[in-house]
Image (spheres, rainbow, N blue to C red):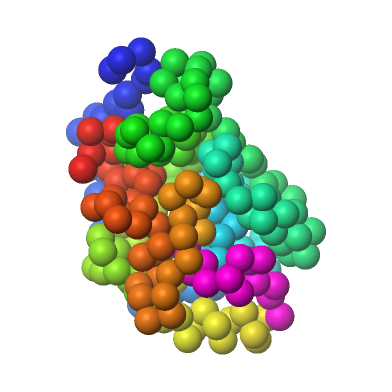
Amino acid sequence: MNGFVELQRPDDAKLSGATARAEVLRERYGELEGEALLRVMLEWEYKGRIALVSSFGAEAAVLLDMVARIDPATPVIFIDSGKLFHHTLTYRGILVRRLGLSDVRTIEPIPFDLAGHDPDGALWQRNPNLCCYLRKVLPLERALGGFDAWITGRKRDHGGERGGLQTIEAVDGRIRFNPLAHWSPENIDDAFRERGLPRHPLSDEGYRSIGCVPCTEPAEADAAARDGRWRGSAKSECGIHHPRWSPTHP
């Protein structure tokens, strides 16, 4: 597709196998969430075959702390799109040291892809879907190549496509866990306070969901958490959570 790699769909056997596996896991562990769900998956079901994908954003410290308490050597994948707030990079360093995380993997877009499609760094203005694809979707897919499962911090409370989120799901032939799917903002606030976790530097400035600089703004206190992302457009997701997402995704 226009000189860059488009993600290939997994074969039917891998897709059906992951779907069946997710059903079994939901039957066994569907009532678990948070640290209880993580402990089973990190120590038993997917030991050595699972990674946490973290943005080190506004709410990320809670899930990172849970994982660190279970196994601080768990691989943590961090996508540095090249457009992040410097506050996020600083916060990453603070949390890594504070929590003792020993395998944080920072992944970046391939320079060749950017040189061919975003030479001036302004692709986000012309085609935000393609920008996300090159800077986030492709790098993450490559980073997940050696894992059978991954963990996200998504929550139903974020709204939009996340409203019906399950704690255990099958996506693109892998199992994906959302341990905080049912957590409310109050649950998150309580966890920050009880665990003594530092907040993202931009949280006090009204940023409730923090992504790339050009596409992130503060959100009103009574707005949905992700209302500050891609404001004024129909776009609500970067694409890393969509099955076989492509730049043509609406």
Question: What is the x, y in percent for residue 178?
Answer: 41, 63
Depicted 81 relative to depicted 9: above or below? below
> Would residue 217 be found to the left or right of residue 11 on screen?
right
Which residue lies at the image location 63% right of the left edge and 40% below the top edge? 106
Observer able to see residue 146: no
Spot occupied by residue 131 in the image (x, y as percentages of width and height): 40, 34
Horizontal relation, residue 125 to residue 203: left or right: left
Looking at the image, which residue is at 41% across and 37% down? Answer: 124
Q: Residue at (57%, 46%) from the top-left corner?
A: 84
Q: Nearer the viewer, residue 102 or 162?
A: 162
Answer whether residue 199 is magenta in the image.
yes
Image-quadrant location for residue 68 = bottom right
Of 151 and 43, nearer the camera is: 151
Front one among 64 and 198: 198
The number of discs equals 0
User: Is residue 129 shown to the viewer in this render?
Assistant: yes
Residue 105, picture quadrant: top right
Main SS, magenta region, reads: loop
Picture residue at 34% right of the left edge, 33% below the top:
126
Q: Is residue 209 above or below residue 194?
A: above
From the viewer's perspective, is residue 111 above or below residue 41? above
Of 104 and 128, nearer the camera is: 128
Question: What's the magenta region?
Answer: 196-209
The answer to whether 72 appears left or right of 45 in the picture is: right
Q: How far across and how far down the image is residue 110, in percent?
A: 53, 24
- Name the residue furthest top: 3
